[in-house]
Image: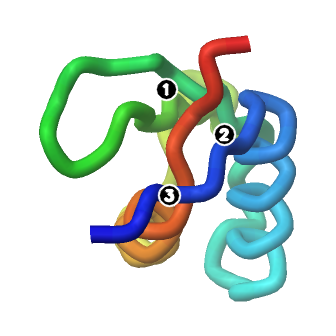
Amino acid sequence: MAAKEMKTRIELGEIVMRESKASGKCNDLRSVMILGPLDRGHSNWDIGTASNHPITRAVSAECRIELNMILARLQVQYDLSAV
């Protein structure tokens, strides 16, 4: 298996935000926080999200589904750099 390309928190966050906004399904997404590095087999990072919802700050189900697809693809390509 080839080594994954390393990305910083900022780079990963920008990629996730750009792709989620481009999908048209995450208009309620306000921000993404990159979590990690994590100790698990398939990827060493994950995300936390915040939305524009005034009470829950949770993203819509449609956006969460889209984010899951985006993350599945990106986590195969990239690992979070330690710096």
Point 21% across, 50% down: residue: 42
Vertical arrangement, residue 66 with respect to residue 27, above or below: below
Query: Circle 1 is placed at which residue position?
Result: 56
The reply to whether callout 1 and callout 2 are in contact (CB within 8 Å) is yes
Residue 49 place in picture, x, y as percent: 57, 34
Q: CA distance from mark 1 to mark 3?
A: 35 Å
Per the image, label 2 sits on a secondary structure element best described as strand
Q: Helix or strand or loop: what does disc 3 sit on?
A: loop
**Residue 68, position in %: x, y?**
37, 65
Residue 51 x %, y %: 66, 39
Residue at position x 57%, y 23% in the image: 55
Q: Determine the image quadrant of residue 30.
A: top right
Q: Is residue 44 visible?
A: yes
Residue type pointed to by label 1: Thr
Work out whether mark 1 precedes mark 2 in sequence or the reverse, and give the earlier one: 2
Say what amino acid the circle numbered 3 marks: Lys
Judge from the rendering whether residue 62 lies leftward or rightward of residue 7; answer left or right: left
